[in-house]
Amino acid sequence: MLELSELQSEILKEVADLHSTPEGAYNIRSDGESAGRRSTANIEIIPKKDVSGLDIKIKPFTEKESVHIPVVITKSGLEEVVYNDFYIGEGANVVIVAGCGIDNCGRQDSQHDGIHRFFVEKNATVKYVEKHYGSGSGAGKRILNPVTEVYMEEGSSVEMEMTQIKGVDDTERTTLAKLKAGAKLVVKERLMTHGDQNAISVYNVELNGENSSADVVSRSVARENSFQKFEAKIVGNAACHGHTECDSIIMENGRILAIPALEANDVNATLVHEAAIGRIAGEQIIKLMTLGLSEKEAEEKIVNGFLR
């Protein structure tokens, strides 16, 4: 069992749904250092020598195994940049759980910038789960700036769940993906901002191989005085299919900017984008209020259902 404080354990539950030492391979990073690490017969976790970060090597045809690499920060003023590279062997089928939680009770900003690169070999399947979370009563900000690069070989499949629901003051998420023939990428982003928070999401997906496909969907809620920007570009360089969608709810004085972009460089590229921003419909609230909920409770229920 890892030696973690009660606060650290609570953050791990939020960002990685961990209630005890995870099964399989893991590396738990806490306040700039490794709090525990384990490799398995099929998944090797190797610390980098030149920069802070890890090389995670998954053997070909590894079946239904997982690796957890969450990050916990509880020190005010801590700023770090971490580089993690994932090498997923041919035909492997794995789940990768990342995520970062920052509890800041001080006056200085705390910041984690995670740069993740995925090299997904032929016919491999990856589910990647990343959750960001902030807490603490201090005046210092909680800042998270993830950069994700995905390089997909023929027939590979990657599903990415990106969630940020609470407590992060500033975030800029940048995602780049390049797909070869028959590769499939699915991105599901769930985001809520409140107070004076700012959140920027930028996706750039290149469909370079025949029959490659990408589906990038963001659902978000901007509350109080917060600001969100969603920018997604899909480039079709072959006979392919791409879809991007931004569906957002705006509340109080929130602001949302959606910039979907498509670039077709092949006559057989099929690309679609959708964007919708609006407030909660009054009839939805009224219907729930007739069932005994207050107006505030009805709003919360609608928002929670929307972000599932």
Image (tube, rainbow, N blue to C red):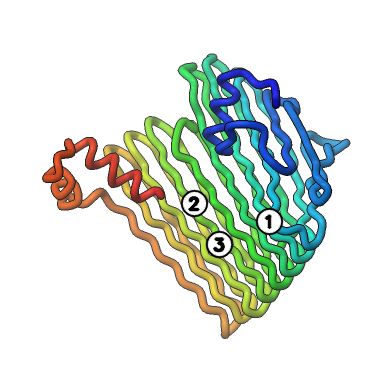
Residue positioned 39% across, 48% down in the render: 307
Q: Residues within 10 Å of mark 3 (few under 14, many from 20)?
A: some
- Which residue in the protein does label 2 denote? 189
Viewer-closest of 201 and 1: 1
Circle 3 — which element? Answer: strand
Where is residue 208, by image quadrant?
bottom right
**Which marked residue is nearer to the observer: mark 2 or mark 1?**
1
Amino acid type for the residue under numbered disc 1: Lys
Left or right relative to 61: residue 11? left
Please tell me the numbered disc located at residue 223: none
Q: Label 2 vs label 1: CA separation?
A: 24 Å
- Which residue in the protein does label 3 denote? 186
* Position in image of residue 278 (x %, y %): 28, 52
Earlier residue among tags 2 and 1: 1
Q: Residues within 10 Å of mark 1 (few under 14, many from 20)?
A: few
Q: Label 3 vs label 1: CA separation?
A: 19 Å
